[in-house]
Image (tube, rainbow, N blue to C red):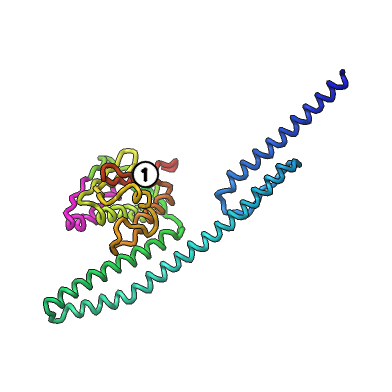
Amino acid sequence: MIFITVILATAAVLLSLKLYIMKKSLRETSEFLAERIGQDTNQLSVSLSRDRELRRLTAEINRLLRELRSQQLLTQSGDLEVKNAITNISHDLRTPLCAISGYLELLRGEELTPDAARYAEIIAGRVDSLKQLTDELFGYSGAVEKRQMSLSRVGLRGALEVSIAAFYAALSERGIEPEISLPEHEIWRILDGGMLSRILSNLIGNALKYSDGDLSVELCDDGTISFSNRAAKLDNVRLERLFDRFYTVETAGRSTGLGLSIARILTERMGGRISAELSDSRLTIKLVFPETRSE
């Protein structure tokens, strides 16, 4: 009887030890995955357990990690090729556009018939649209390039005032009188001032293109910036794609659809969040830069 008890106790101890080693190995594997899954590394998982099934699981995890790494490299390579192609195309387009603009100015200096003058104005409008498209393409290639940020103490209220003032003439031409709500005091964040200016310009420019005739801009005390306007052509399906590359609500050639995509890239790079919601045909885009310890 004592002998059987000793055997059972020994078996229980050995089983407990095996369970402990298995749990430890699974915990280490879980911690490894959580640490490595988002990192740019080729390091694989190593199982310290002698259990056959655990070693098989580790081998399968390593196979999946190798496949994931391979896909990441392919994606990075593809993104680089796209960025280089966009940069080259924008450069290639700028040269003939400058030449067209120059000859167009010479043509305007000549005595033209009313029809010829009207055609010249149409050409000038198309050239301006093409210049805007090439600027957006060039801006996108610069946004996706992970250059070193120049961080400093930036006032959100002041940055908004400057951006709105820059667009005031264009908004007035469209008959848009923006409703602006800003706090009396400044709200400071540690950001790249140039990137913030680009984000705000893209968001106001987007409202300028697609608003149904109004624009509301609000800065809250918590640092949330809201841009709101009526957008009857927008629905929830299109809303989901609003920040996608090259997506536009309208198919007109006035835009590449890169403005909001660039805004999202730059916002997330500085640790912020950008989102869009639609309620009663009213689009609201919210921009949030949380406070940091360095502030």
Whether 104 is drawn above or below 72: the answer is: below
Q: What element carries label 1?
A: strand
Q: Name the spot of residue 189 as percent of width and height, x first.
A: 37, 45
Residue 102: x and y in percent read 25, 77
Q: Left or right of 194: which side holds 115?
A: left
8 w.r.t. 118: above or below? above
Q: Which residue is drawn at 68% across and 37% down?
A: 24
Name the main secondary structure of what is drawn in magenta. helix
* Residue 104 found in image quarter: bottom left
Q: Is residue 122 magenta?
A: no
Q: Name which residue lies at 87% across and 18% down.
A: 1
Residue 170 colored magenta? yes
Asked whether 287 or 283 is in front, the reply is: 283
Q: How crowded is mark 1: few (under 14 residues within 10 Å), some or many (20 or more)?
A: some
Indicate the amino acid at tag 1.
Val
Quadrant for the C terminus in the image: top left
Q: Name the residue under label 1.
A: 288
Q: Which of 287 and 153 is in front in this view?
A: 287
Residue at 33% over, 44% down: 277
Task: Please identify the quarter of the rendering in which residue 180 is found.
Answer: top left
Residue farthest along the top direction in this orientation: 1
Location of residue 71 in the rendering, given as x and y in whole percent from the top left corner: 56, 57
44 lies left or right of 178: right
Highlighted range, magenta:
155-179
Above or below, 17 against 141 in this view is above
Residue 66 position in % (x across, y down): 62, 54
| Residue displayed at 43% across by 55% down | 149
Give the tally of numbered discs.
1
